[in-house]
Structure formats: C-alpha cells, structure tokens
Image: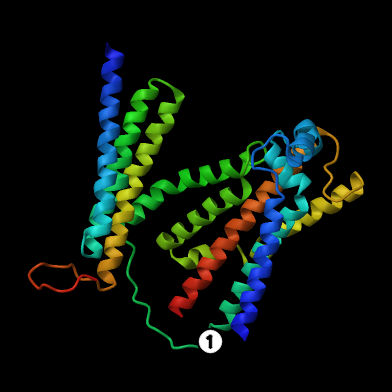
Amino acid sequence: MRNALALLIVIVLAGLMMAGVSQLPPPGSPDGAVHRHVAAHYIDGGTEAGGAPNLVTAVLLNYRALDTYGEVVVIFAALVAVLAVGLSGHSRGPRRQPDELPVSPVVDRIIRLLAPFIALFALFMILEGHVLPGGGFQGGVVLGALLILLSLVLGPRRIRRMLPTPALFWTRAIAPLVFALTAIAGLALAGWLFALPEPAWLRELILVGLELAIGIGAALALVGFYLSLEADHHD
Amino acid sequence: MSELLLTTFAAVLIAAGCLFFLAGTIGLLRLPDFYCRLHATTKCDAVGAVLILLGVALIAGADTQTVRIVALIALIAISSPTAGHALARAGWHAGHRPWTREENDEPE
C-alpha cells in the first residue's frame, strides 16, 4: 500500500516535472525569454546599478543580496548547531585515551613554509572578490583550511586561544551581522534594503566589507567544525 | 627550427606526464594494498603534473604566465610528496601492515 502510494506520488511529480521541462526553451537559444529580458537588463545596467564592475559579483552582492544573506545565515546556523551538539557531548561518552602522535617534522616544516603564501592567497581571493567572480566564500575556505593546517602543527589549543572568547563570539557572527548592517544602511541611505549608497568609493568599500565578512565567517565556521570534531575525538 | 625543437620537447614532456598519470591511475585500481596504491598515486601529482606544467611553461615562453607556472610547479613539488608522506605515516600508525606476497594474505 505504502509502496503503491509512493510510486503514485513519484509518477505524478515526475509527470509535472516533465511537463515543466518540456515547456522550457532549448538551452542556449538566444531567443529565450531569459536571454532577451532579464540577462539583457543585467548586462545593460548591471555594472552601474549593481555597484560592482563584475556582473557575477553584482548579482551575488546586490541583485540577490538577500539570497547571499540567507546563505551566510545558513553557514552560521550550521556552526551554531555543531557547537551546541559538540558542547553537550563533552561530558558523556566513553573517554578514550588520545594516542598522541607528534606531527611529522616534514609536515611541520612544510606547513610553516607554505602558511604565509596560503594566507596571502586567501586574502587575495577575498579582496579580489568584488571585481572578479567568486571571492568571499572561496577565499574563506582557503583561510579556514590554513587555520586547520596550523592547528595540526601548533596544536588546537593555540588556534582556540588565537581570539579571546568574546571577540570570537562576535567574529563568528560577523557575516550575518555585516549583511544585516548593509541592508539597514541601504534602507536608511538610499531607500531600499541592500541599496548601495551613491559615491563610488563608498560602494566599493561596502562591497569589500561584505566580501571580507563572508570570507572571515566561512573560515571561522570551517575551523569551528574542525575544532569541535577534534575535541570530540580526544575528550 | 629552434621553435620546432622547443615545441617537440614540450610535447614529449607533456606526453611523459600523461604516461605517469596513466600508470598512477592503473596502480590505484590494480595494486593490492594501501601503501602500494599510495606509491602509485603520489607519482601522478609529483611527477606527472610537474612534467606537464614544465611542457606548458616551455610553450608559454618568456611571459608572466611562465612565472605563475613555475610557482605552481614549486607548490606541487613541495606539497604533493608531503601529503603522500603524511598519508603513509598515518596509515602505518593506524596499524596498516604492508602486504607481502609470501604470506599470501588477502589484500585489504
């Protein structure tokens, strides 16, 4: 009975999807509504209205800023959830003796050698994000990976103590906070959410700020995941 | 003439690099245990990619691109063997014992 019901639902949904897909214009056709109206509009006025010289960035940080805001909030919520679960698991469970194996001297030396270059590359990706497609999230992931590598060499305690707890508390939430701030500032200065105020340098500054916030938020989320896994493993 | 020579040399380097990738991939699929497979696959990046990039750098000639390619070669040459070393070390300390033909044991 349940199987028959599931089959029925699948068939109905598949039929609806097929019907929808069959109405789509052939992919890549230049006469499609998407290409004649929306895309043309973006290409015509995107750079000016979006405030970013790159159209992808303009869409990401301006046209669909609300969507990006949602993404940042999702990442932050995931971090909060992992931290909450990790903290509750601390006291319970069988305590297993950590088999402390020192990091190999080769790995240690190589990570120390590469760390400044990785940091530079991460910063480059984040800052370049407002003129080239991509940026904040990708650079943040590189930065987070660097911090995880460093925690292998220096020990997770040093990484945990890098920021005092109150500062860490606020920095973890930096991406949603900065996005909310930008949204409200746009509403106050130009009249709608996420509007970028007029002087070009201010727009640029805001875009760089948004990219930095995305990057730092993503990096700290990654490090948070890793550190709470690591604590679970050793405690 | 010299350009033809350079291009031929670059082509030979790239083909050799591809050969290393092929050998590494076959090794990954066919070799019996963790250490053997690691031995095969670390050759892909460390030798294969470096050879291909050297060929590309030769074709690019004296250009800013070449500087980037050389930096990339340096990065791969440093990081890939380190990753292989770390994997092998972790495997050893996790209790993997190398497969031997004499014992005739089942590969993991």
Residues A219 and B23: in front is: B23
Q: Residue drawn 48% across and 60% down?
A: A148
Q: Is residue A43 left or right of residue B70?
A: right
What colour scheme was applied to this rendering of the protein? rainbow
Q: Is residue A162 visible?
A: no
The location of residue B49, given as percent across then percent down, is: 33, 40
Q: Residue drawn 23% across and 59% down?
A: B30
For badge 1, the amino acid type reads Ser
Residues B79 and B58: in front is: B58
User: Vertically, is A219 above or below A186?
Assistant: below
Q: Is residue B80 left or right of residue A56?
A: left
User: Vertically, is B22 above or below A39?
Assistant: below
The image quarter containing residue A205 is top right
Chain letter of the residue carrying label 1: A
Residues B8 and A87: in front is: B8
Q: Residues within 10 Å of mark 1 (few under 14, many from 20)?
A: few
Q: Is residue B32 visible?
A: yes
Q: Residue drawn 63% across and 37% down?
A: A132
Report which residue position mark 1 lands on. A91
Q: Is residue B80 left or right of residue A135?
A: left
